[in-house]
Image (cartoon, grey):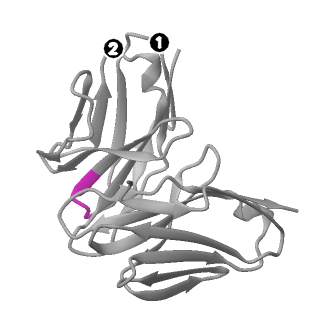
Amino acid sequence: NAGVMQNPRHLVRRRGQEARLRCSPMKGHSHVYWYRQLPEEGLKFMVYLQKENIIDESGMPKERFSAEFPKEGPSILRIQQVVRGDSAAYFCASSLRTGPGYTFGSGTRLTVV
Amino acid sequence: KNEVEQSPQNLTAQEGEFITINCSYSVGISALHWLQQHPGGGIVSLFMLSSGKKKHGRLIATINIQEKHSSLHITASHPRDSAVYICAADPNRDDKIIFGKGTRLHILP
């Protein structure tokens, strides 16, 4: 059981490029959560997804950010036209929901230059 | 006011000291999590509590549901315990967990 896998661990993008962050939940987990940690700040909720459904995206910026969790494959957090302020660590967590709690991935550190 | 409050924000102690980090929350919860994050590192889940007390090695976590308060204790602290410790409340609803701002712990050799 490999746990929650996030890749890449580090991602550098120039302003205006797109960033794609991937999260493979733990085997059997069908709930995925994305969190953002800005430098020197706490973790903030972004979006909660189940397979093929966005359940709660109240923490997502209205523009440039999108997330999906397809029937097959990892969950993807996509940031279009990145800006310097998007530089942060992005963490994914998954849960079974009916059983024990969350398992976190190691995060993706996005740097926009 | 944040729904999850941690104290202290920063803590520096000598190796060997007994450490206590506190967490108070204002929402109804199904569980409370303690997480550890090393500088530049990922997040490790230390405990998930819904009542009572749990122990893992030198780490102890307690929760008082009536008082909506949890504590994380570290016995015989060591420099490798230096990290940010985060309390997170898992609400009584099908929703996202709520994080405290973290306690930055620095253990001096």
* Rendered image: mark on residue A51: none
Residue at coordinates 71% horizontally, 64% vertically from top-left?
Answer: B81
Front one among A2 and B60: B60
Alpha carbon distance from label 1 to label 2: 9 Å
The residue furthest right is B109
Three-letter code for the amino acid on which mark 1 is drawn: Arg
For mark 1, does the 10 Å Cα neighbourhood hold few (<14), some (14 to 19), or many (20 or more) residues? some
Front one among A102 and B91: B91
Q: Position of residue A53 (x, y in %)?
A: 11, 46
Front one among A81 and B104: B104
* Rendered image: mark on residue A81: 2
Residue at coordinates 26% horizontally, 62% vertically from top-left?
Answer: A29
Residue B26 visible here: yes
Q: Who comes first in sequence, dot 1 or dot 2?
A: 1
The residue furthest left is A53
In the image, is residue A88 above or below residue B65? Answer: above
Q: Judge left or right: residue B28 versus residue B83.
A: left
Q: How many marks?
A: 2
Q: Are marks 1 and 2 in contact (CB under 8 Å)?
A: no
Give residue A30's quadrant in the image. Answer: bottom left
SS for dot 2: loop
Q: Position of residue A40 (x, y in %)?
A: 56, 39
Magenta residues span: A28-32
Is A109 covered by the magenta stretch? no
In the image, is residue B12 above or below residue B34? Answer: above
**Which residue has dot 1 on it?**
A14
For mark 2, does the 10 Å Cα neighbourhood hold few (<14), some (14 to 19), or many (20 or more) residues? some
Give residue B80's quadrant in the image. Answer: bottom right
Q: Mark 1 lies on which chain?
A: A
Three-letter code for the amino acid on which mark 2 is drawn: Gln
Q: Judge left or right: residue B74 versus residue B15.
A: left
